[in-house]
Each structure stands twice: as C-alpha cells, then as structure tokens.
C-alpha cells in the first residue's frame, strides 16, 4: 500500500507562505512528478510529506492514517536526495545496511534485502567501495538502493538526476522508469526539468508560487493546459502567446471562444505555408533533427517555430506560417484556458 | 627609477617617496647584477630567512651548545665542554616513577606533573570543546553572541588570564564569597594541592577551549545537512547519529585539535605560573617552569641543565608533531 493524501496543506516561514492550500491524492503505485520553476515550493512540499519538515496547517494521510505529526522515520517512506546524501565514511554495503541496523533487523533478513537491491541495481562490484570512489551514476544507484532496502510505503525522489551529466541523465531516467514498473511502488519525484516530468510521470503536478496549477497526465498537460502558466511551462520550446489580432490571418473560420483575449500556439504546430502569418527570421538554430526558427511578426510580437529536419533560411528572410486550428489554445484576460466553440 | 609620468601626487610627497624607492633600488640592482633576474627571488626571501635564523636557528644552536657545556657563563667560548653530563644528571634515576629517587628530582616532578596535567587538561578540554561546538552549531538563540563569548578568552594575554582567575580564586575572591553566601566553608583554591591542580586545569581550559571550539565548529559546519536528514529518514537515534555520522566526519578536525592541544599543554607555563607560581610546593611545577627556573630564576642558575631539559621537552614536541603529520596523512590516504 502506498496511498498519500494531502488536505489543505499550508507551510509558512514567518510571514512568507510557501505552500498555499495544497490538496492532492496520490494513488498506490502511481509515479507523480512535482514540477515547477525554482522557488515554487515543490521541494518544500516533498519535505512536508517526508516528515523532515512539518506543515503550518493541513493534514497528510499515508494509507488513510493521519501522518501529519508522525516522525519521518515512522512514516515508512524512503527518500533519495539530490546530493545522494551517502555517508562518505561508510562503504556502499554499510550505507545500504545503516537504516536496517537502526531498525534492529535480523542479519539474515538484512542480507537478503541488500542482496535483492544489489542485484536489481547491479551494484555488486561496488559494495566494498566508499562513495568518494564512485561515479555520479553509481552513487545515484546506491542512493536508490538505500531506499529500496527499506521496502518503503512510497519513494520520495528530490531532483535525483540533476547532478548527472546530460547523457547519464537520459539513461538513468529510463532505468528509474523501469524500476518503477518493476517495483510497482508509489513514487513522488521532484524536478524542474519538464522533459523528466513528461517522460517519467503517470501524473504531473505543476506548481507555481506554492499553489497547484494543474494535476494531470503528461499528454493532458501538453494538450489541454488549464492556464497560460502551465501552457508556457510544459513543452519545449515554450508556447508562443499571441494576441487575436496577431493570429487573424490563420484564424479563418475558426470560432474564437467568448472571452478569449490571447492565443497560444506551440512552435511544433506551426509550419511554413503559402498563406498565414508573415514572419521575419531573426535567428536560426539548426539542431539536426529539427530547426528552431526565431522571428518577429509585423506587430513586433516574437515567435518561435520548430520545423522537422533542416530548413534553409537565414536572418532577415521572410516566412509565412500556418497552423492547424485544432492546435490553437485560447486564454482569457485572467490567463485561464477557454475552450474553442 | 620611478618614471616621472607616474609620480602625480605632487612634488612634496613624490620626492621623498622617489628617494626611498631609489635607495631600495641600489641593493636590488647590485643583487640582480650578481644573481640575474631569476635570482631576485632570493633577494626577497633573505630578510625573512635572516630573521628566522636569528630568532630560531641561532637560539637553537646556542641551546644545543649550552646543553653540552657547563658553568654559569653566558658566552659560548667561556663555557667548558661536559658532553652528555647534563642529560645523564636529568635522566639518572633509581626508579623513574619515583622522582625522589632521581638525581634531578625537580625535573621528574615537573615531568610527571606535566604528564598528569596534559592527560587531564586535554581529555577534559576535548570533551568540553566537542559538547560546546555541538551546542553552538545547533539552533540556539543569540548563537553569534555565544560563539564570541567562548572565543573571547583566547584573545586575552595569558598573564591577564592568570591574574583575573587569581583575583577570583584567592581566599577573599568571588568564589569564596559565593560559598560564603550559602554558608559554606571557604576553600583554599590556590593553596591546597588538589584544588590548585584543578584550578590550573580549569583556567587553562577556559583560556584555550574557544580556539578548539572554533576548529570543531568549522568541522561540524562542513558536514552536509543532507546526511542528517538521510539519517532521520533512516530512523537513526540522535546518539547513534553522533557516534556513527558526526564523530567519524569530525575526526580530521578532532585529530588536529587533539594534537594541537597536546602540544600546547606540554608547553603550559604562563597562566599557571601567574596563578599559582607552580605551587603549592611543587604540585603545579611543570616542565617549562622548571626550565625557566633552572636557567634563569634560581640562585644557582644552570643554563646547561636548563638547555638539556628544554631539548628533552623539544623532542617530546617533535614526536607529537610527527604523530600529527603521520595521522593526518594516514587519514587523508584512507
């Protein structure tokens, strides 16, 4: 069992309210990713769940038991830290065993659990080494192993891949995903990297300034963001936000929903065409598999276009762009999504 | 010569500055002519080497010569060679654990007193320094103030420390005044052997502990907070966290503190000398005071014997310093 429920959770440091009325249910076996810009409160939220920090008000339920005032050790959760937090003076084996020794677990059971985790993470040859003798990826595995051996109710992962290089991050991401599938455990994963969030999550929780903006599966967030912030945060490159006047040439017969003041178009959904938006190219980024073209419209609004493959264009040239109306997003004056008529 | 374009601070100031610079240039040019441009490094090192030689190497040489020569004469050429006689006199004992059976009983009294002082002072101070550093590293009110309070005595001159505590511990001092308020009997803090030894140890700890607390505090602050949070998630009781996480990670700093404290304690002299004068009797007579009194203060002063004793003490300090270096390297390799 690994069901977690947060009810009206608030956290303040002095006058500063860092978490504002957080309500969230995480189902058993789910991998939920907290994502948001720096300072949005995602790590703070994780710390409240872990028990390392206590909320100012509100409740945390773990498997329907109120764990708000339960100590971190007694919540049955395991945490993987951004810095790995491995004990530097202990060998890998001692690191794995430390928590189990605290629980005064019989040696036979302890050995069994360690062996299982070691086999799962393929860290057998590292057992006698100290963390200082390991690479970043190996340390990460050991940190995950330390969490696994405790057989926790849920795993809490605080930006676990952010200290790895780009290549290793991709492979570790895949391994984490496979591990989640294999363990079937509840996992809460904090990251500021939306690619990590999109690829790993069953559901993503988008946070801004201590508030939950949207909770949804990755593809829903991408296709139906509830507001301009989520629309802008999810997807790379960022969504283009244009006034209705700017996009008039591509609106055609599309019915603009009542109250809409702004449109959003993802750079991937724009394509060169005979008629449409007239853009002057200001910068071309050829990435090989795709080309990102920066430009300005006649109104002065900046716009980004992503075109598959290599496109021959250069600064100062004109391009005409079109968009499938189905990919148009509309937002009202309060920056909330408005569905097309 | 400094170029005229750069001397823009006016004629009054520029002229003396320029003259000074030109005066310094003369030996520099002369040296460069001899040693060449790469050899100029030695020009800048020589003044320091001369000072080091004058205040360290020359006294050390004189000390060695004194230790193998006899008499009360100060000029080396006037002294007569006695070989290892002073060392023999110092080390000659029927039973080294009984100073009274030794030819130079005061030396052995001072040596055993020093060993007792070092063991007591260092062990109590280390425990006290670790506890204090742990408290000062925690979340306490006015933390910066308390850190300053503990460090303040380190800034005081040992003589001032000795005098302050002498005033407080004398028969009419504040300690006995407090006892008097509780109708307790006054204690002869500085004239009863046990109390005087305790006072010497206590005052010495008070004077030096702040420095060691500072080193330990730096070590504690270098331990990542994440480790304690990981331990908390692992359900580690605070005592186990201290023994299994804090202490091993603080060990490099603790090692430095132990060795520095040992070296410092072996050299104990000034504050205890001011506080008790080495008494009562010889209960607070330590090696440095013995050397000082034999060499300079007694009527039958014997610089040769004092020099031999100081070399024995120096060899103890060398062993301790080498132990520190060895242990640090061993720890680094691990």
Image: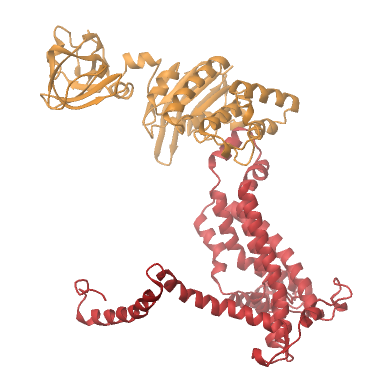
Chain colours: A orange, B red
Comparing A91 with B273, the one in front is A91
| Residue A42 rendering spot, x and y as whole percentages | 43, 30
Inspect this view and state whether residue B250 appears. Answer: no
The answer to whether A165 appears left or right of B329 in the picture is left
Comparing B256 with A133, the one in front is A133
Residue occupying the point 30% across, 18% down: A289
Q: Given the current orientation, which residue lies at the most extreme left position? A: A298
Inspect this view and state whether residue B296 appears. Answer: yes
| Residue B34 rendering spot, x and y as whole percentages | 40, 76
Total tally of numbered discs in the picture:
0
| Residue A41 rendering spot, x and y as whole percentages | 41, 32
Residue occupying the point 52% across, 52% down: B141
The answer to whether B53 appears left or right of A277 in the picture is right
Give the answer, above or below, for where B278 lies relative to A221: below
> Residue B17's quadrant in the figure?
bottom left
The answer to whether B98 appears left or right of A296 in the picture is right
> Residue B229's quadrant in the figure?
top right
Give the answer, above or below, for where B58 lies relative to B72: above
Q: Quadrant of the N terminus of chain B?
A: bottom left
């Amino acid at each position: 069992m690994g069901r977690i429920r947060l009810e009206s959770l608030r956290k303040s440091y002095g006058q500063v309210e860092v978490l504002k009325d957080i309500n969230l249910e995480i189902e058993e076996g789910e991998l939920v990713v907290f994502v948001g810009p720096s300072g949005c409160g995602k790590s703070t939220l994780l710390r409240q769940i872990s028990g390392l920090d206590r909320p100012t008000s509100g409740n945390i339920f773990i498997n329907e038991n109120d764990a708000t005032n339960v100590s971190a050790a007694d919540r049955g959760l395991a945490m993987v830290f951004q810095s790995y937090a491995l004990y530097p003076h202990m060998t890998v084996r001692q690191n794995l065993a430390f928590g189990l020794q605290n629980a005064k677990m019989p040696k036979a059971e302890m050995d069994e659990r360690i062996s299982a985790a070691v086999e799962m993470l393929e860290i057998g040859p590292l057992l006698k080494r100290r963390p200082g003798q390991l690479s970043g990826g190996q340390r990460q595995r050991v940190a995950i192993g330390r969490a696994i051996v405790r057989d926790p109710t849920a795993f809490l992962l605080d930006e676990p891949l952010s200290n790895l290089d780009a290549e290793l991050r991709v492979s570790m991401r895949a391994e984490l995903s496979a591990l989640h599938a294999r363990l079937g455990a509840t996992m809460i994963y904090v990251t500021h990297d939306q690619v990590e969030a999109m690829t790993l999550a069953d559901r993503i929780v988008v946070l801004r300034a201590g508030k939950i903006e949207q909770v949804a599966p990755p593809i829903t967030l991408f296709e139906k963001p509830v507001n301009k912030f989520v629309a802008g945060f999810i997807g790379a490159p960022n969504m283009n936000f244009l006034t209705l006047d700017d996009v008039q040439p591509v609106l055609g017969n599309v019915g603009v929903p009542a109250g809409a003041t702004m449109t959003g178009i993802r750079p991937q959904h724009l394509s060169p065409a005979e008629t449409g938006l007239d853009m002057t190219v200001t910068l071309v980024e050829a990435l090989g598999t795709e080309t990102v073209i920066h430009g300005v419209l006649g109104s002065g609004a900046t716009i980004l276009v992503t075109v598959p493959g290599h496109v021959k264009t250069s600064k100062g040239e004109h391009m005409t762009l079109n968009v499938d109306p189905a990919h148009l997003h509309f937002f009202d004056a309060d920056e909330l999504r408005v569905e097309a008529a | 010569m400094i170029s005229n374009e750069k001397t823009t601070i006016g004629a009054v100031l520029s002229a003396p500055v320029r003259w000074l610079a030109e005066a310094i240039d003369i030996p520099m040019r002369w040296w460069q002519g001899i040693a060449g441009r790469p050899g100029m490094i030695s020009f800048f090192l020589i003044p320091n080497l001369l000072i080091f030689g004058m205040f360290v190497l020359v006294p050390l040489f004189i000390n060695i010569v004194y230790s193998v020569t006899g008499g009360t004469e100060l000029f080396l050429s006037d002294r007569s060679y006695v070989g290892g006689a002073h060392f023999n006199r110092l080390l000659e004992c029927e039973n080294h654990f009984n100073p009274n059976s030794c030819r130079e009983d005061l030396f052995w009294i001072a040596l055993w007193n020093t060993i007792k002082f070092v063991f007591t002072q260092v062990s109590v101070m280390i425990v006290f320094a670790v506890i204090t550093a742990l408290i000062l590293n925690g979340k306490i009110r006015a933390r910066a103030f308390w850190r300053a309070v503990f460090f303040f005595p380190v800034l005081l001159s040992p003589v001032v420390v000795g005098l302050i505590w002498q005033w407080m511990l004398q028969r009419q001092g504040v300690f006995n005044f407090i006892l008097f308020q509780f109708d307790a009997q006054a204690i002869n803090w500085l004239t009863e052997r046990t109390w005087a030894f305790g006072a010497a140890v206590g005052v010495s700890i008070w004077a030096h502990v702040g420095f060691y607390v500072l080193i330990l505090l730096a070590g504690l602050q270098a331990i990542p907070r994440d480790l304690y949070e990981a331990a908390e998630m692992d359900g580690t009781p605070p005592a186990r966290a201290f023994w299994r996480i804090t202490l091993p990670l603080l060990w490099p700093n603790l090692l430095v503190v132990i060795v520095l404290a040992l070296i410092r304690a072996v050299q104990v002299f000034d504050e205890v000398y001011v506080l008790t004068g080495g008494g009562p009797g010889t209960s607070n007579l330590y090696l440095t005071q013995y050397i000082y009194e034999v060499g300079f203060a007694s009527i039958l002063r014997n610089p040769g014997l004092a020099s031999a004793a100081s070399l024995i003490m120096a060899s103890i300090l060398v062993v301790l310093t080498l132990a520190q270096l060895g242990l640090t390297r061993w720890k680094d390799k691990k």
